[in-house]
Amino acid sequence: MCELCILTQNFDPARHTHNLPWGTPTSDDTEVVVPPTGTLDELADYLTDGFWEDVGGTGRSFDFSPGENTDYVVTVNLTELTNVGQRLARWALETWETVADIQFVEVQFGGDIQVDDEFDGAFAQTTTDRTGTEITEVFVNVDKTWISDFGSTLDSFTFSTYVHEFGHALGLGHLGNYNGSSGAVTFANDSYQQSVMSYIPQDQVDATNASFAEPTGPMMADILAIQSLYGASTITAGDTVWGQGGTYSRHFTTLFAGIDDEDDSTQEAGPIAFTLFDDANDDGVDLIDLRPSTTDDVLNLRAETFSDVGGLTGNVAIARGSAFENARMGSGSDIVIGNTLDNMLWGHRGADNLYGARGNDTLFGGRGRDELFGGGGRDNLFGAQGRDDLFGGRGRDALRGGKGDDYLDSGAGNDVMTGGEGLDQFFYGFGHDRDRITDFSLGEDELLFSAIDFENYNAERFVETYAVEQANGVAFEFGQSVSQGADYNDRLVLVGVFDLDALVDDIVFI
């Protein structure tokens, strides 16, 4: 039998590290060797094996070998808990089901995991077979007084404790060589940001750029660790909406709905941290919907990254092996960073920055003064309302400014630019390939060119040298200026514009 967290009744839920030693003293006790910063793989390996080795044991898990338990089912007995305790326990179990290929089934008698609330503190006692590697039974306790002392909502210390103890029940250790109120830090980046199995708040770790927030489920290292034991969950296979109007109605939908909703009965608007997992191997198209948010959020859709949501720093993570295609933001001035997939990003309200990365992306600025960056791929950029800046990047892009006085820079590739309403500026440079402007308005819009590329030109000479009238409008042919840095294919067409004399007044060198 192995007891974990048996001394956590001495924990101060005001979030202290309990004076755990930071590093190892040298022989003369005058210098401390700072622990190393662990990679994600090293942190996950420590949770499944390293911790157990440090305490003289071996890694363990429930055995789902063929012929033993092919349904990946673990039975759980919650009958000794209060109604509130049962609710917290079920929420916590759901967080593990969301990321691992495991199913919890409640039973009235016995059970692989038996949960109680009669003893002091919070702990997990694990019984293994003779090899020490197969879990046969677990007893989990979370003192019922914690509900009144520390809360009963998703953002409470009580809830994160349930998640933590069920992590032990499934075979995870701590993220450092500590237990109860003793031990030492093993990794410089050990904190709640990486693991709900950590003892250390985010804001007490120099190597972690994150605000304090209560972990409300398995974090990035936990997910990698638990999936190495049981495989990845398929619960969210298919098209999944995380957040407002979520099609996934389990724990995270409730959690997202309460980010800026202090009336949500499931939480008290305390700081929360969480990690999202949605299997990259399924064929679904997934959306993170943060429209209720009123804060200036930073959302990074790339796996193994952290985001800033709800006024906090580094509190939302995307797990390894995840794929999120789309994102809708709230009313703050937000930043969204896409990934290699075909992303659809909505800025909504606020002055937003949207980055499309390498896929064939569609970016909607919404209201406010937005900046849209297509990146690689064949992108569609819509400024919508406000004075927006659109940058196509590489690839064959379509840029539409919408309402407002917009700035459009198509970048490389054969692109189409449409300014829309307002006094718009269109930038063209050498290497931009064959572009078209569909709605250039003489006397209102401006054509911007690099003063470096055309240092010896004024507007009149520029038009005389490069502009020719064609059936569909004026074309600027820059192939003749290859020696100056242009490409043979560089060409800009102003559709529907035929007055070269008037065009001279709309050309600006910057």
Image (spheres, rainbow, N blue to C red):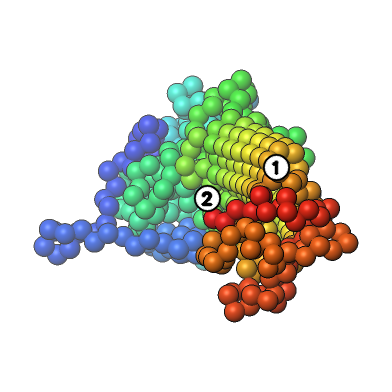
Q: Which residue lies at the image location 45% right of the left edge and 63% below the top edge? A: 39
Q: Nearer the viewer, residue 41 or 210?
A: 210
Q: Which residue lies at the image location 74% right of the left edge and 46% below the top edge? A: 442
Few, some or many C-alpha atoms within 10 Å of disc 2 (few <14, some 14-19, many ≥20)?
Answer: many
Q: Which residue lies at the image location 41% right of the left edge and 48% below the top edge? A: 209
Q: Position of residue 113 (x, y in %)?
A: 60, 45
Q: Which residue lies at the image location 58% right of the left edge and 60% below the top edge? A: 458
Specify the farthest residue to the bottom. 483
Q: Count up the numbered dots.
A: 2
Q: Nearer the viewer, residue 95 or 473?
A: 473
Residue type of the residue flagged with mark 1: Glu
Whether residue 305 can be seen here: yes
Q: Position of residue 21 (x, y in %)?
A: 26, 50
Q: Nearer the viewer, residue 296 or 160?
A: 296
**Horizontal side of residue 108 vs 25, given as left or right:** right
Whether residue 255 can be seen here: no
Q: Quadrant of residue 387?
A: top right
Upstream in the sequence, badge 2 or badge 1?
2
**Horizontal side of residue 403 vs 6, given as left or right:** right
Q: Are the two marked residues, 2 and 1, in contact with CB atoms closer than 8 angstroms?
A: no
Q: CA distance from mark 2 to mark 1?
A: 43 Å
Few, some or many C-alpha atoms within 10 Å of disc 1 (few <14, some 14-19, many ≥20)?
Answer: few
Q: Nearer the viewer, residue 92 or 420?
A: 420
**Horizontal side of residue 81 vs 75, given as left or right:** left
**Pointer 2 residue:** 306
**Pointer 1 residue:** 444
Residue type of the residue flagged with mark 2: Phe
What element does badge 1 sit on?
A: loop
What element does badge 2 sit on?
A: strand
Q: Position of residue 439 (x, y in %)?
A: 79, 48
Q: Quadrant of residue 451?
A: bottom right
**Horizontal side of residue 431 vs 27, given as left or right:** right
